Image (cartoon, rainbow, N blue to C red):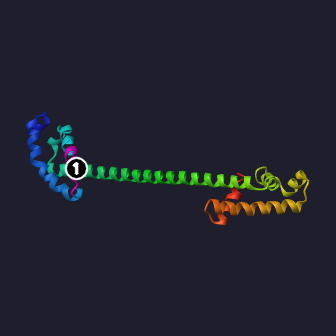
Amino acid sequence: MARLATGDKSAFDTLYHYYEPRLRLFLTPFTRSDAHLLNVILQDTFVKCWIKRNDLAGIEHLEYYLQRMAKNRLLDLLKLQKIQSNHIGHYAQLQEQSVQLTGNQLQLKEYMSIARRGIDALPERRREIFSLSVFDGLSIDEIAGRMNLSREVVKKQLQKARTFLKTYIAEKGDLPVIVGGLIIGSLHS
């Protein structure tokens, strides 16, 4: 140990060749036969021994000291692996959600395009009434006043427009009629 403290490499080689098999045997059950992990721990442990060679002379039971160092390094690496695994899992989940969100946005854009084509297919006066209601946010009374129509005519035209569009979107978008209604309801946004 005194020779090691002065930086004698042959003393380190002797220490390494004596304790490396013992530490390997000690660590094997904890590393679950992961040879790479085991070799990393052993390497880190002996590098640390070389760095702390001046402190080793005062250690009474060197084998126990090396075992504790190796065990601490193992625990550090296992914690790091767990953190990395969690981050990878979280990243994969975010990627999946992003792909799903993009797909949903494209699908919604397609449904909105179908809805717009359905609006264009409405008779002109019905389309104008529907547009004033949905896109301009006018009430039935305001539309009736602006277009010089009765309140009942506006109501009836709006109902016919909505019914037509629900069916149109359901057929062209291959959706249930209720979903077509939801899309119609979201047009004003």
Say which element carries label 1. Answer: helix
Principal secondary structure, stretch drawn in magenta: helix
Q: Residue 90 location in percent, x, y?
A: 44, 53
Q: Residue 173 location in percent, x, y?
A: 62, 59
Crowding at mark 1 (Cα within 10 Å: few <14, some 14-19, many 20+): few
Q: Considering only vertical position in the picture, is 100 above or below 170?
A: above
Q: Residue 24 location in percent, x, y?
A: 16, 53
Q: Considering only vertical position in the picture, is 108 above or below 59?
A: below
What's the residue at 9%, 39% (across, down)? 11
Left or right placement of residue 117 versus residue 140 in this view: left
| Residue placed most toward the observer, 53 or 127 | 127
Instruction: Tell me the kind of residue under disc 1.
Output: His
Is residue 181 visible in the rendered image? The answer is no
What's the residue at 16%, 46% (across, down)? 59
Q: Which residue is mark 1?
A: 36
Q: Considering only vertical position in the picture, is 56 above or below 165?
A: above
| Residue placed most toward the observer, 70 or 178 | 178
| Residue placed most toward the observer, 114 or 58 | 114
Q: Residue 52 location in percent, x, y?
A: 20, 39
| Residue placed most toward the observer, 134 or 76 | 134
For residue 34: magenta? yes
**The image quarter in which residue 55 lies:** top left
| Location of the N terminus (image quadrant) | top left
What's the residue at 65%, 62% (across, down)? 171
Tell me the magenta residue range: 33-44
Is residue 37 visible in the rendered image? The answer is yes
